[in-house]
Amino acid sequence: MNEICIHGLGIVGLVQALKLCEDGHKVALYDINSDIKESISRAKIPFYERDIEGLLEKYLNQSLRLIDESEIANYNIHFICVGTPSNSNNTVNLDHLISSIEGIEEKGIKNATLVIRSTVPPNTITELTHSKNSFDNIIYFPEFLRQGSAWKDQQDEKTIIYSVNRGCDSTFKGLFKEGVNFKSIDTKSAEFLKYANNTFHALKVTFINELSSLADVMDVDFKEVLDLFTSDTKLNISKAYLSPGLPYGGQCLTKEVKALSKISKLQSIQTPLISSIEESNDEHLQRCIESLKKYESAGFIGIGFKSNSGDIRNSPVLSILNALTNTHYFHSVDHSTMIKARKHLSIESLIEFSKVIIISTNDLSLKDWEKLFKSSRDILISSTKIKCPLPNYKPRVIGETKR
């Protein structure tokens, strides 16, 4: 059993902490945000993520506890899971990462192991830690968790991809149970891998939405095409991110596509394909907006950037709401989405006020679906991943003009 300190209590940090508890370790939680700490102290996660609130209740004040800054020096293993958002010029903001590393260094800890999970451009870890003498071992451990299924992704992580920036990996590898495969790669490769993954996911989203829009205007049965296209796992890889619907949003894909485009420009490398991903995504957003302008009013059920996520950052649904300012718009928010200063209506009120209803969540009950179906309103779904439980009823996907 090890004692580990987690810095940053967003999805990555908290899910990592709970996984370490599951594996038998004692974990300390540290964050500079007092609201997040207060929420966690009540066993309430400060975001929506399935499956982990019960785990937080199980381990809090047992093998998991919140600590103040003064207690950081009591730990020799530190996981940094802080955010690295975009700056206004699309470069990566490293302020939280730098302050976390320096904060640990200032405590005078000796023989520490530093594990960094934050997403950063290539060469960042080496540059930030080359003069930090408190750390015997520095490991970069990129994360590949999806919002809405982060705990499942963490549980399913059978291969641990990491890099040793300094020292050795024995302490790091000792944190995991038997049966895990380890893949050690170069630090710059590990840093670049996250950008490669998320840029490709963004490309798939924009690619499939362009095809869907083109098939729609040409009266092609795109569902039939898509079923065959995604069934070819030999050449077309997999179905992941190939679900027509809203454009991509959220933090990861958005900021990492922007960052990679910016990195390309700074390196004087022309990458027109990568640079066009954001443009294509924006064009699809405009198509979705135009498809709704014919309605007097619209209702939205679920306004996170994707189903099963409470994150409204860069949410395409909110972009649509803000674009339709000349009409009255009402929406109902499912329990998975946290937002303030908006009208929260019941399903009945939503139906009464809305000529079209857009569903962006899989959390609707069968009774709610039946109410919507009987309402005679136009019902749209934000993605083909939204599953309607009513037999013989297949709502149109937002952006489609024909059916």
Image (cartoon, helix red, strand yellow):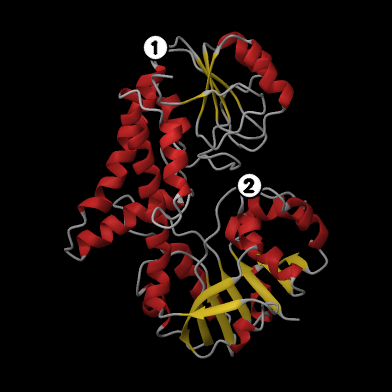
Indicate the secondary structure of the residue bearing disc 2.
loop
Residue at point 40%, 53% (across, down): 236
On the question of residue 108 being in view, the answer is: no
| Residue 321 location, quadrant | top left
Looking at the image, which is closer to me, 116 or 383? 383
Q: Quadrant of the C terminus?
A: top left
Mark linked to residue 23: none
The amino acid at mark 2 is Phe
N-term mark: 2 or 1:
2
Indicate the secondary structure of the residue bearing disc 1.
loop
On the question of residue 19 being in view, the answer is: yes
Looking at the image, which is closer to me, 172 or 287? 287
Position in image of residue 298 (x %, y %): 50, 17
The amino acid at mark 1 is Lys
Position in image of residue 367 (x %, y %): 74, 21
Mark linked to residue 47: 2
Position in image of residue 315 (x %, y %): 47, 37
Q: Is residue 199 above or below residue 135?
A: above
The Cα–Cα distance between marks 2 and 1, rounded to whole angstroms, is: 35 Å
The crowd level at tag 1 (other Cα within 10 Å; few <14, some 14-19, many 20+) is: few
Q: Is residue 137 above or below residue 241?
A: below
The crowd level at tag 2 (other Cα within 10 Å; few <14, some 14-19, many 20+) is: some
Q: Quadrant of the N terminus?
A: bottom right
- Count every numbered label the image shows and give the total: 2
Q: Is residue 35 left or right of residue 167?
A: right
| Residue 182 location, quadrant | bottom right
| Residue 111 location, quadrant | bottom right
Position in image of residue 260 (x %, y %): 31, 58
Q: Is residue 193 above or below residue 111?
A: above
Q: Is residue 228 left or right of residue 59?
A: left
Residue at point 65%, 31% (across, down): 334
Mark linked to residue 294: 1
